Each structure stands twice: as C-alpha cells, then as structure tokens.
Image: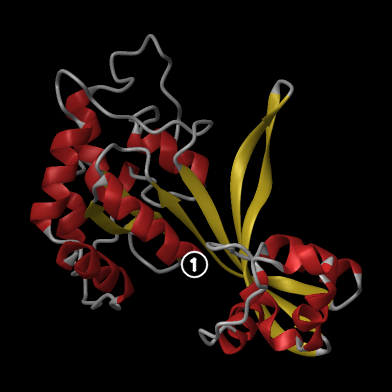
C-alpha cells in the first residue's frame, strides 16, 4: 500500500525544471547539425522508440541493418525523455531501458495494440458557464482501419454532485416490500438526494452516458482542446506518460514525462487515479 501511495504521489509532483546543456543531447548524437531532434508527431515517437526511423526523420526499410538495431536504438531512446525533469532519475530510466533493449526479448510499442490511451482536456460552455471536461480515448478497429473512440469522461460537476448526495445514509427498501406490491416505492422517489442509496452495492454512475444525454439536451457548447497527454502500459511492468513540450533546443516535442515500474495491482489503482474514479 505504501508503494502504491508513493506512485500516486510521484505522479502528482511538479517537475523541477533546470537549464539543459547541449552536451546532454550531444553525448547520444554524433552530429547535432544533422539531428532532427524534435519528435513532432506521436506516430514518430513510436517509430523512434522502436528505432524504425533515422535521426533525419526518414523511415528505415525493414530490410535495413538499422531497423530496430539494438545499439542504435539505445542511443536514440535517451532523447525521448524530458531531460529537464529531475524526477526522471537515471536509475529508473536505465532499468526501463535495460528491459526495453534486452538482447533476448526486446520490447517494442505497437500503435494499433491495446495498452495505451489518450487523455484530452477540453473547454466547454456548460449552462452558459466555462467548464473543463476531460475525455479518454482509445483506438478501435473498424473493418480494415482504426478510429479513435471515447471510452470515458471526467467532469467535476458530476463527481461533486454525487459526492454531496452520497453521505453514507442508510435508506433502503424493506426485504418484504414485494408483499406490499412495492407500495413503499414512494420513499425511493420522495427525495432525489438519496436515490443512490436504493441502487445495488458497487453501483457506479456512467458519466459518459450522462454527458451524451446532457450534450443532446444542448447544455454543452464545445469551445476548444486545452491539453493532451497519453498513458502507456504496453511495456510489461512499467507505466509512462507522454506529453508534448514546445520549447527551444533539441529536447522538445513528444517526450516521456513520467516513468515508474508498476505491478498489476498497482496498475488498477493507477487507472482509477487517472480516471478520477
């Protein structure tokens, strides 16, 4: 339990930013003048992580000696981290890289496989007031192609409403209610504040269904995307977060901003944390 709490704490800590020297990138690159260092696209991050393209951004042929070459791959993997984030310590990164570049069983990312998803923070007008809504999306196969689909949503107004109303009351329907033809049903609907008390144990509201209903009622007016990040669980025993950094220098673009080893038990806890469940 202590380890789980420490993982959640580490994911919420703000990164300490400090100046980065050109030599940090230079020690991984032979010629900085030829390096297209910015990882401009998420697809490009996948290819660089797997060493499926060169430093000039040109993809390797699968017949090329450089395609997924373990030595070259290790050299370029290092620039895919946010090097200005002091919470990404060398020991954790090296442990991760040793797993990923293992000679006998290297690990690669698969764009079309499960184990990664997007978190999109958006701005809406809700009942005329500016509000933020976070959507979670995954890739889903359709015929011969793929598409992004919304799998979950987080909206503070929904969670706060349920927190306020679910105060641990003990409202219930008597087990012999059926003998009264459920005439005591009036108790269920007499006070909307306690409606959740009459649901089954473990009941969890479906925020996405609520959102879709209210959107169709015209209560939401879309404004813009505010922020975007990706969560990865594709490397067994590890979790990392991918964010985009717009700054000068070589260490920019889509970079790994969070990294931690994680067990299956810890994974379920972390998923609940990410989804705000």
- Is 123 situated above or below 80? below
Camera-side residue of 187 and 273:
187
Image coordinates of residue 146 in percent, x first then y, are: 67, 32
Q: Name the residue under label 1.
A: 277
Q: Nearer the viewer, residue 31 or 134?
A: 134
Percent of width and height locating residue 194: 67, 84
To which quarter of the image does residue 271 belong? bottom left
Q: What element carries label 1?
A: loop
Residue furthest to the left: 91
The image quadrant that residue 90 belongs to is bottom left
Q: How crowded is mark 1: few (under 14 residues within 10 Å), some or many (20 or more)?
A: few
Residue located 89% across and 66% down the image = 216
Q: Is residue 80 left or right of residue 165?
A: left
Q: Residue furthest top?
A: 63
**Residue 214, horizontal then vertical, whole percent:** 83, 72
Residue 58, compared with residue 6, is above or below; it is above
Work out whether residue 143 can be spotted.
Answer: yes
Residue furthest front as drawn: 179
Q: Residue 252, can we see it?
A: no
Residue 226 vs residue 276: left or right? right
Question: Is residue 18 shown above or below 127?
Answer: above
Question: Which x, y percent locates residue 184?
Answer: 79, 77
Q: Identify whether 18 is placed above or below 22.
A: below
Q: In which quarter of the image is the N terminus?
A: bottom left
Residue at (42, 33) in percent of width and height: 47
Task: Give the residue displayed 21% in from the left and 53% down from the top.
Answer: 25
Q: Quadrant of residue 104 in the image? A: top left
Instruction: Indicate how the structure is coloured in the image.
Output: secondary structure
């Amino acid at each position: 339990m202590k380890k789980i709490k420490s993982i959640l704490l580490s994911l919420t800590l703000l990164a300490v930013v400090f100046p980065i020297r050109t030599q940090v990138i230079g020690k991984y690159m032979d010629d900085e003048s030829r390096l297209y260092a910015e990882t401009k696209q998420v697809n490009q991050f996948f290819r660089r992580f797997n060493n499926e393209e060169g430093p000039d951004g040109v993809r390797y042929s699968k017949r090329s000696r450089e395609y997924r070459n373990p030595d070259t791959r290790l050299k370029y993997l290092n620039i895919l981290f946010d090097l200005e984030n002091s919470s990404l310590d060398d020991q954790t990164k090296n442990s991760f890289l040793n797993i990923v570049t293992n000679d006998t069983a290297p690990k690669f990312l698969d764009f079309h496989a499960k184990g990664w998803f997007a978190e999109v923070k958006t701005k809406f007008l809700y009942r005329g007031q500016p509000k933020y809504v976070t959507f979670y999306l995954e890739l889903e196969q359709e015929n011969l192609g793929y598409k992004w689909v919304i799998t979950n949503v987080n909206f503070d107004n929904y969670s706060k409403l349920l927190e306020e109303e679910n105060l641990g009351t003990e409202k219930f329907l008597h087990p012999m209610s059926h003998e009264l033809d459920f005439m005591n049903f009036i108790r269920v609907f007499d006070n909307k504040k306690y409606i959740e008390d009459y649901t089954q144990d473990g009941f969890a509201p479906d925020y996405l269904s609520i959102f879709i209903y209210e959107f169709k009622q015209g209560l939401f007016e879309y404004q813009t995307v505010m922020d975007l990040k990706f969560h990865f669980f594709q490397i067994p025993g590890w979790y990392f977060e991918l964010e985009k950094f717009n700054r000068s220098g070589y260490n920019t673009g889509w970079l790994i901003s969070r990294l931690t080893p994680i067990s299956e038990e810890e994974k379920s806890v972390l998923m609940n944390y990410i989804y705000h469940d």
